Amino acid sequence: PAELTMAETDPKTVQDLTAVVQTLLQQMQDKFQTICYWIAIIVLNSGELDDMSCRIDDLEKNIADLMTQAGVEELEGENKTSATNK
């Protein structure tokens, strides 16, 4: 045949190319596994974050309730009124 490709004339080139492709595929697989690991960590921790967020919301509500019971809101309102009257 008049047109021979490099692969047909130089088997070492094909082996080199195969090695490069295998290395690239391995690097891609490693990166993919790393990304999957971090996604799993984020997903697993998101439940904990949601739980912590609910706890903080409950705490804020309890503090607001205690402040209301103690009449703190009334005092704050009086201070704001007197400050604007000055």
Image (cartoon, grey):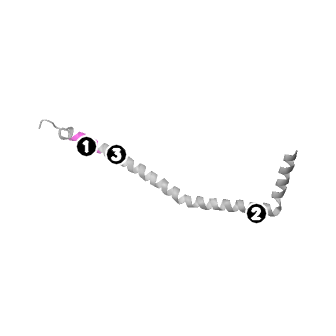
Dot 2, how many residues are within 10 Å of its Cα: few (below 14), some (14-19), or many (20+)?
Answer: few
Q: Position of residue 50 (x, y in %)?
A: 59, 60
74 relative to 52 in the view: left or right: right
Secondary structure of residue under mark 2: helix
User: Could you tell me how far apart the alpha carbons at marks 3 and 2 are, in whole angstroms?
Assistant: 62 Å
42 relative to 85 in the view: left or right: left
- Looking at the rendered structure, the kind of residue marked 2 is Asp
Query: Which quadrant of the rendered structure holds the N terminus?
Result: top left
- Looking at the rendered structure, the kind of residue marked 1 is Gln
**Residue sitting farthest toward the front:** 85
Q: Position of residue 7 (x, y in %)?
A: 21, 40
Report which residue position mark 2 lands on: 65
Name the foreground residue: 43 vs 24: 43
> The magenta stretch spans which residues?
11-18
When the figure is inspected, residue 8 is found, relative to residue 76, above or below; the finding is: above
Dot 3, how many residues are within 10 Å of its Cα: few (below 14), some (14-19), or many (20+)?
Answer: few
Of badges 2 and 1, the one in the foreground is: 2
Asked if marks 3 and 2 touch (Cβ < 8 Å), the reply is no
Name the foreground residue: 55 vs 21: 55
Secondary structure of residue under mark 1: helix
Q: Residue at x 78, y 63 (%)?
A: 66
Q: Residue at x 85, y 50 (%)?
A: 81
On whether residue 61 falls in the magenta region, the answer is no
77 relative to 17 in the view: left or right: right
Q: Residue at x 58, y 60 (%)?
A: 48
Q: Residue at x 42, y 51 (%)?
A: 32
What kind of secondary structure does the magenta stretch mostly adopt? helix
Report which residue position mark 1 lands on: 15
The label on residue 23 is 3
Mark 1 or mark 3: which comes first in sequence?
Answer: 1
